[in-house]
Image: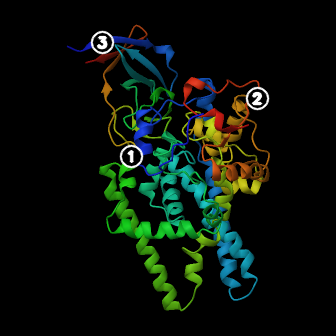
Amino acid sequence: MAGTVKRDYSLVGESTRRAIETGLASAEWYHTDVSRKAIKELMQRSDGPAIRDTIIWIVAILGSAAGGVYFWGTWWCVPFFFVYGVLYGSSSDSRWHECGHGTAFRTRWMNDVVYQIASFMLMRNPVTWRWSHARHHTDTIIVGRDAEIAVMRPPDLLRAALAFTGILDFRYSLPALVRQAFGKLTPDEKSYVPEMEQHKAVIAARWHVAIYVATIALALTMRSWVPLVLIGVPRLYGTWHMVLTGLLQHIGLADNVIDHRLNTRTVYMNPISRFIYWNMNYHVEHHMFPMVPYHALPRLHELIKHDLPEPNPSMWHAYREVWPVLLRQLRYEDYFLKRELPPTARPYRGEFHEVNMSAAAE
Amino acid sequence: MADWVEACAVDDVEEEDVIRFDHGGRTFAIYRSPDDEFFATDGFCTHEKAHLADGLVMDDIIECPKHNGRFNYKTGQAKGAPVCVNLVTYPVKVEAGKVMIQIA
C-alpha cells in the first residue's frame, strides 16, 4: 500500500505541482456512452421551465419577506423568515449554479440576470466564482486544482457542522468581497481567474459591498434590524439546506480520480428539496454532462443509470453511509468510499487513473 | 498556399448541428446553421481542450460541452467567460454535395 502523502489544498502548492505532473490536471474524464441524438435532445434549452420556477421562486421570496416584516416583533414572523432564509440563503445556490452554466434558460440575458442576483444573495463574487466553478468541472476533487472542495482530508468535522449555520462561509465571504473591492486577489484566485478578467472581479465586489453599506445605513437610519434580516443575514440563518444537500455531492468519496462515478454522488431527494436544489441531486449526471439543463437531469438519469453506482435512496441514507468514512478519515486520510457499480456498468478502469484502491471501503 | 480539403458530405451534418473532422493531425468542427449554411472552426475550445463537436449549436452559437463557453461559430468570436480567446475560422464551400474547407 502506498504511504499517505499529506494533501496540500492550496492551488499553487505541492499537490498542484503533482497533479500537473501526473496528468490529473485537465485530464480526459470517463463518460458513459450516450448517442449524439439522445444527448443533443437532452441538451436542448428552453425558457419555459426556468421562467415558471423563477416566478414561483420570486413570489415565494417576496411573500415570505412580506409575512416576516408584517409579523415582525411576534413569534409569527419565525416561520416566514424560516422560508425566506432557505429561499435566500440556499435556493440561490442552485440558481447561481445553473445560470452560471447558462443552462437554466435558453435566453442568455435571463441566465445572466438571475446569476448576478443569486451571486449577491450568496455573497459570492460573480466573476471569481464563475472561474472557480469552471475549474471545479475541469478538475473535480483533484487536490491542488479544485477550488471548491467542501470537506478536505482529514475532515474537520466541527467546521463541517458549523457550515450548516453559515457562520464560516459568512466569515470568509464578506471579508473576501471587501478585500476584492480594494483590488486584492489572492494567489489562489489569480491561479484560476485569467488576468484579463481580474478587474471585473474587483468591480463586481465593489457593487456588492456598496449594497451592503447601503443596507447597513438604512438599518441605522430606521433604527431597525429588518433591513439586515432581509439582506445579508439570511446567508447565516438560511444556509443550512444548501449545506445539507451540497455536502453530499462529493463527501467521503475518492479524490484524485478522473471518473465522476468514483468521486460524485447522486441522491434521490424529496420534491421540495429538489425544487430548492434544482435537481442537482443528480450530481454524477450533471458532472458527466454539464450541458444538460436541470429540468432534463431526471431523463438523463434514466438513460445512464445502468452505468452508474446505485443512487442513495435518501439524504439520511447518504449521511449514514458517509459518517463512518469520515470518522475513519480522521485517522487515515486516504480512506474513501468506493461506490459499487451495477453489473450493467462499464467497470472502473485501473489504468484510467491512479487511485489507491486498497484504501477504499466498498 | 491554402488547400481545399473535403471534410464531409452535406448530409453528414444535421441542420443546427456540428461534427468533428480530423485532418493532418489537426481537429476541426464543421457546422450546419439553421439556415442551411456551412461553417468551420478549430475543433477544440480555446479555454480548455474540449471537442466542440460534442457541444450544442443554437442559432449561430456553439456552446462548449465542458464549461458551456460560447462562441459565434460564423465569426469565431468568444461570447464571454469562461472563453476569452476567439476561435479560428476557416473558409467553407459546398461542391457536388461535399463540404470543403480551406486549411492554411
What element does badge 3 sit on? strand
Q: Is residue A165 left or right of residue A316?
A: left
- Circle 3 crowding by C-alpha within 10 Å: few under 14, some 14–19, many from 20: some
Q: Which mark is residue A342?
A: 2
Residue identifier under label 1: B80
State the SS at label 1.
loop
Q: Position of residue A281 (x, y in %)?
A: 68, 47
**Placement of A248 over or under B38, stated as above or below:** below
Residue on which the image places disc 3? B4
- Amino acid type of disc 3? Trp
**Residue shown at the point (52%, 86%) measured from the top left:** A219
In percent of width and height, residue B10 lies at: 46, 14
State which quarter of the image contains the C terminus of chain A: top right
Q: Is residue A125 above or below residue A332?
A: below
CA separation in Å, label 1 and label 2: 40 Å
Q: Are marks 1 and 2 in contact (CB under 8 Å)?
A: no
Q: Chain of mark 2?
A: A
